[in-house]
Amino acid sequence: MVSSIESSVGIERKVVTELPGPKSQALHERRKAVVSAGLTVGFPVYIERAEGAILVDVDGNQLLDLGSGIAVTSIGHAVPALVDAVSQQVASFTHTCFMVTPYESYVEVCEELADLTPGSHAKTSALFNSGAEAVENAVKVARLATGRSAIIVFEHAYHGRTNLTMALTAKNMPYKDHFGPFAPEVYRVPMSYPYRDGLSGAEAAANAIKIIETDVGAENVAALLIEPIQGEGGFVVPAEGFLPALSKWTTDHGVVFIADEIQTGFCRTGDWFAVDHEGVVPDIVTTAKGLAGGMPLAAVTGRAELMNAVHEGGLGGTYGGNPVAAVAALATIKTLRDRNLLGRAREIGDILLANLRSLQQDVAIIGEVRGRGAMVAIELIEPGTKTPNAVAAKAIITYCQQHGVVALPCGTYGNVIRLLPPLIISDEQLADGLGVLGDAVRSVQ
Ligand SMILES: *Cc1c(COP(=O)(O)O)cnc(C)c1O
């Protein structure tokens, strides 16, 4: 059966068993014998197929996907353009290793990245398999190009789970606990978090810069690495002016500004990249998640003079920029453009923010509604305080799951619920999901 976005409009949320259903429960039992317990599952329903914004599980339940596999399937599931491109590529060849014998689609992806990422300067890219790998390589390039070693990161940051990226990530549990020792020369400074620090962007930037200059010294800093809107850390949107002030400071001090756009990139926030919102032009941008519609692909894109400072053979990997993933990225980018999903992300943002702000008026446990485009969250608190309320967040997510809606938690304190719907979601599906979420919030209130 050929799936299509058009036909998915007819597919709606439908719960036909308890959730998880009996077949999912059996699979989950089977899994316990052979899958490491270190991988937790947020919602143990086993998926058989998916279409548009709907996941169909092995028990025949139709779940509304408000997570997009963590901001990955932004163009929706089983999009014909992507299915066709990937199928044809698999039939032609699946792998040569770009460093052994190259192919055109890799070059084409790098052309798109040079074109789409902020700034009109000459840019080159290198492709990898995962977000963490891209971040590691961005740090390698920045250190080599500057001859310096210190990396500045932020509170609540998330950059991955490999050894270097664990050091760059803020939160101990579950990401870092007992996995050390960690890579050295990583320095953490406060993030602008308007709901909790009450500072303007300029004040928060001045505060961070003062710490960098006194504790590290600008002349030792290779790169400042920041998520323009934090993802796992709680969808923290820095106050206006914070990113431009940091960007200016890096330029003034020969520091490489790396924007980690792995979660925010590719139209998610209503711009191609979240830094575009304030006209910030990073020296290096890391991308992954939304780039290739679910195929594993990540990229480091930066000023040509930085990226090309690397000696021959200094960057690479067996699978990076795999031809199947590369054509998936080209089909994804074309779909984002052809369907104007950037505009759609803005519309989704307007709907989400208006709906959730009105819900906030009715209840006492939503401290803040924040986000941009199709990247919006509610931060839950104990009524009348700003004390994080992780218990409420968990109960709300469980309610959503039991009613066939996939929503994800996040936040350093586990008290934030984030919405990352696929950008092709219909108004009706969005209203349906928001209805369930509203009922869930009222039920724990
Ligand atoms: C998910 C994420 C990463 C890590 O990507 P993986 O593909 O899981 O390694 C890095 N940075 C940000 C901002 C992310 O959201």
Image: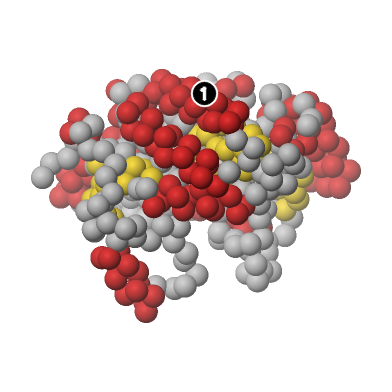
Residue located farthest toward the left when viewing the structure as drawn: 1
**Could you tell me how many numbered marks the image carries?**
1
Q: Is residue 423 left or right of residue 82?
A: right
Residue labelled with disc 1: 354
Can residue 438 be seen in this snapshot? yes
Please say which color scheme the image uses: secondary structure
Quarter of the N terminus within the rendering:
top left
Can residue 288 be seen in this snapshot? no
Res. 237 image quadrant? top right
Mark 1 residue type: Ala
The residue nearer to you, when weighing 364 against 177, is 364
Can you give x and y, in whole percent of width and height, for residue 173 in the image? 63, 62
Can you give x and y, in whole percent of width and height, for residue 211 in the image? 84, 42
Residue lying at 29% horizontally and 61% vertically, measured from the top left? 21
Residue lying at 58% horizontally and 43% vertically, measured from the top left? 445
Res. 196 image quadrant? top right
Q: Secondary structure at mark 1?
A: helix
The residue nearer to you, when weighing 204 against 124, is 204
